[in-house]
Image (spheres, rainbow, N blue to C red):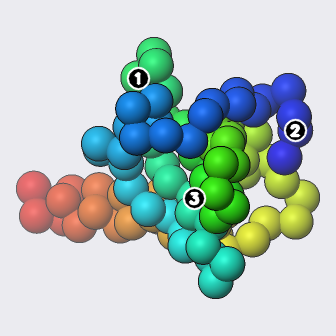
Amino acid sequence: MTTSARLKMPQSKTQVSTSGARLLYHGAGGETWLLVKDEAGAPAIEHRAAAPGATADRLAVTAFLADRNPGPQQKELLRLIGTLVDSAAAGSETS
């Protein structure tokens, strides 16, 4: 992950909204990775550390996927994107 692609945000119920968020991965240590929309409406990834008082990192999808050592959270996003292709192909077969 590149630090220039991150936006530090306090992790609180009033400042970090989860409405419309989709859970990508929940780590054994309690951290979570969510697919969200940023302030402009573009898709983004939000990482929430499990530690009390930790900040939530929000980064662009491109930066998230550019990680050279993909973890289960990147693999889940790619799997989710793949389901869109599967759905589009299924829809074109019925037309």
Residue density around tag 2, few if under 14, some if 14–19, many if 20 or more, within 10 Å: few
Residue 80: name its quadrant: bottom left
Q: Is residue 52 above or below residue 31?
A: above
Q: Determine which residue is flagged by label 1.
A: 41
Give the number of the disc on residue 33. Answer: 3
What is the quadrant of the C terminus in the image? bottom left
Q: Distance of mark 1 from mark 2, alpha carbons?
A: 21 Å
- Side of 3 relative to 43 (left or right): right
Tell me which label, 1 or 3, sits earlier in the chain.
3
Name the amino acid type tagged 3. Trp
Residue 29: x and y in percent read 67, 78
Q: Is residue 81 above or below residue 41?
A: below
Looking at the rendered structure, the secondary structure element under dot 1 is loop
Residue density around tag 1, few if under 14, some if 14–19, many if 20 or more, within 10 Å: few
Give the number of the disc on residue 2. Answer: 2
Tell me which label, 1 or 2, sits earlier in the chain.
2
Give the camera-side residue of 75 and 37: 37
Name the amino acid type tagged 1. Gly
- Side of 44 relative to 83 (left or right): right
Residue 30: x and y in percent read 60, 73
Give the camera-side residue of 24 and 29: 29
Q: Tags 2 and 3 in contact by the CB under 8 Å rule? A: no
- Side of 74 relative to 93 (left or right): right
Seen as rendered, the residue at the extreme left is 95
Q: Residue at 84% of width from left, 46% of height from top?
A: 1
Give the camera-side residue of 24 and 68: 24
Residue 21: x and y in percent read 37, 48
Name the amino acid type tagged 2. Thr
Give the number of the disc on residue 60. Answer: none
- Of badges 1 and 3, nearer the viewer stands 3
